[in-house]
Each structure stands twice: as structure tokens, then as C-alpha cells.
Amino acid sequence: MQQVPVSLWTLVAGIVVTATSIWIGQNHTLMPVQASLQAPLVDGFFNVMFTIAIALFLVVEGTIVLFLIQFRRRRGDDTDGVRVEGNVPLEVFWTAIPTVIVLLLGIYSVDVFNRMGGFEPAGHPHSAAHATHIPGSAIAATLSDTEATTAPTIAPTIGIGASPQTLNKPADLVVDVKGIQYAWLFSYPDSGITSGELHIPVGADVQLNLSAQDVIHSFWVPNFRLKQDALPGIPTELRFVATKPGTYPVVCAELCGGYHGSMRTQVIVHTPEEYDSWRTENQIAQRENLNQVVAINPADLSTSEFLAPHTHDMGISAATLESLVIGH
């Protein structure tokens, strides 16, 4: 019986490994649902890396298993193994191939980063009038109304900015995001709305101006495949387009303290009609709340009346609050 050449076995193994790794690399379910324009770019890069990783795993582990069987010690064989001095062509091969792979992945990753807007975080000034809407902004406390309409301020220059398609174009929606221990606060300069959740319309080019009040936080939306640090004293930017209506988790991905794990909220992607309705309702609600605050003099309220709106958040009933106040 004629023995099958090793080269033929190698060819067959290479075909099997290639087909298997490509199928697994393109058909896995490791990533959550894509919900942004940037997500396919990240997933494409991840799939390539995962395909290469599967191929390397099969080759390395397959070789180990093959050698365990082929070169196992036979019963009664007490001789020494074959002395191997080295194989220069093999060593060059297994050094050159990983080097080429790493270089190609590096070039690919830079291209993805550029197409996502990583090389263009803003790069153009916004008016200081916009900065005065940012809660806690130093410029809001120091500039007069006249100065605010004329003096420019520098936009964030760190983060994911405009893509090559939207370069030098203003975003459709700008939201100021502040990270604090342990919550995210979202302020909408165009409408004056402040929320604990991020509400955006689908298909809109959204720009988040990120900042941190205390320590470093990291704004991460897994479904968008986007993550950007919020740094104390250094403005950063995250710009994206949501492509699928729904509710998606927002997670802090930077260890920021003892309750870091609970620093979560959500981004709600609306249809344009739903977003307009949400914005109108919240503008009316916040205007009514402001009118109530202006109309009521806290000095005229008793302690129980002053604390009554907060009883639900405090986890106690109004009757319990009244008894506590009377008891003191």
C-alpha cells in the first residue's frame, strides 16, 4: 500500500483549518446586536482577529495532539529520542508569519480607527455661548452675556470625532455628559433638558461632550461598539450615529470606586417622531417644575412639607416622615 505523502496531508489539513476558522470567525454569536454606524467596522476587525485566532489555535493544538499520538513512548522502548539541533527555515517561518499578521492587523486597525473618526475629534471651535450651558462650566461663571456671544472656546480634541464623511460638518445633536460617582448626567444645551438617561433619535449624528467631576470614568455602549474615557479637567468627545431604535445599556468601564459596578444607565434610541415627543414633554415638565420652585418659598414650608417630594427616594412613607419630624 502506497503511503500518502506528508505534503498532501499538510495541504488537506490546511484546507480544513482554513475553512473551519473562517466559518467560526464569521458565524460566532459573541457580540451583542449592532446598533450604530460604527459597529460593523469594529465587528469586521474583530471577526478577522477571531478567525486568525481560531486558525492558530487549531494548528497549535492539533500539532500537540498529533505529536502526543505519533511520538508517544511505545511499550518496551527504552531508547533515547532523536536529537534535534534546530531547524532554521522553520524558525524563520514561525517568526515571519506572526510578524506579517501583526503588521497587517495594525494597518487594518488604524484604518478602522480613522473611519470611525478617531483622528478627527472635533478640531473646530464652538462658541462660548454653548459652553455656558454646560453645568459647572468655568466659562459660565466668568463670562458676561456679551463675551459669551463673541469669545471662542476650544472643543474637545481627544476621543472619537467626526468620520471622514461628516468632517467639518456640525453634529445634528450635541449632548453634554458628565460622569460622577456613581452616575451619568446628560444635559441638552439646545433644549435645556437634563436627564439621567441618554435619549437620541435614530439616524442622527450625535456628539457627546464628556467630562468627569471627580475621577476617571469610561462611557461604554457595547451595542454601539464605542467606549470613551471621561477625564477630570480634560474634555473628550464621542461622536456616532445610532442605526436601530431600542434601549441599550451604558456601562462605566473604568474602575472608579467602591460602587463602580452600579454606575449604569441606558441610551434610548427613538424614532424621530418619538424623540420630538420626548423632548417636548420633558421641556414642559421641567418648565413646570421650575415654576413650582420659583412660586414656593422654602422658608414658608414645614420640615415635613419640604421633604415630602423626596419621601419616595428616601424609601419611607409620608406618615413615617411626619412622625419622625414630630419626634424630633
Image: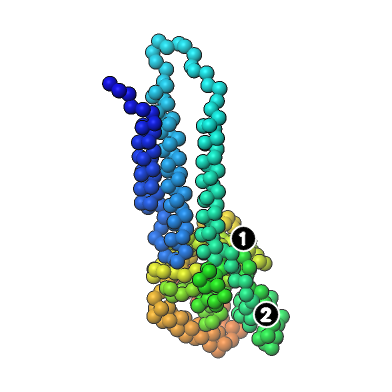
- Residue 55 at x, y = what percent? 42, 42
Of residues 215 and 224, which is closer to you in this image?
A: 224
Of residues 52 and 88, which is closer to you in this image?
A: 88
Q: What residue appears at the point 42 percent right and 71 percent down from the top-left corner?
A: 269
Task: Identify whether 116 is placed above or below 174.
Answer: above
Task: Identify whether 114 is placed above or below 205.
Answer: above
Tell me which label, 1 or 2, sits earlier in the chain. 2
Mark 1: amino acid? Ile
Mark 2: amino acid? Pro
- Residue 8 at x, y = what percent? 36, 32
Q: How many numbered markers are drawn?
A: 2
The answer to whether one can see residue 177 in this image is: no
- Residue 32 at x, y = what percent? 41, 58
Q: Quadrant of residue 85?
A: top right
Tell me the CA gap for discs 1 and 2: 27 Å
**Mark 2: secondary structure:** strand
- Quarter of the rendering occupied by the C terminus: bottom right
Q: What residue appears at the point 36 percent right and 44 percent down from the top-left corner?
A: 19
The answer to whether one can see residue 276 in this image is: yes
Q: Are the residues at dot 1 and dot 2 in contact (C-beta closer than 8 Å)?
A: no
Q: What residue appears at the point 47 percent right and 70 percent down from the top-left corner?
A: 241
Determine which residue is flagged by label 1: 216
Residue sticking out furthest to the right: 142
Tell me the mark number nearer the camera, choosing from 1 and 2. 2
Disc number placed over residue 36 in the picture, else none: none
| Neighbourhood count class around disc 2 (C-alpha, 10 Å): few under 14, some 14–19, many 20 upward | some
Q: Quadrant of residue 88?
A: top right
Q: What residue appears at the point 55 percent right and 52 percent down from the top-left corner?
A: 106
Determine which residue is flagged by label 2: 152
Task: Identify whether 19 is placed above or below 236.
Answer: above
- Quarter of the rendering occupied by the N terminus: top left
| Neighbourhood count class around disc 1 (C-alpha, 10 Å): few under 14, some 14–19, many 20 upward | many
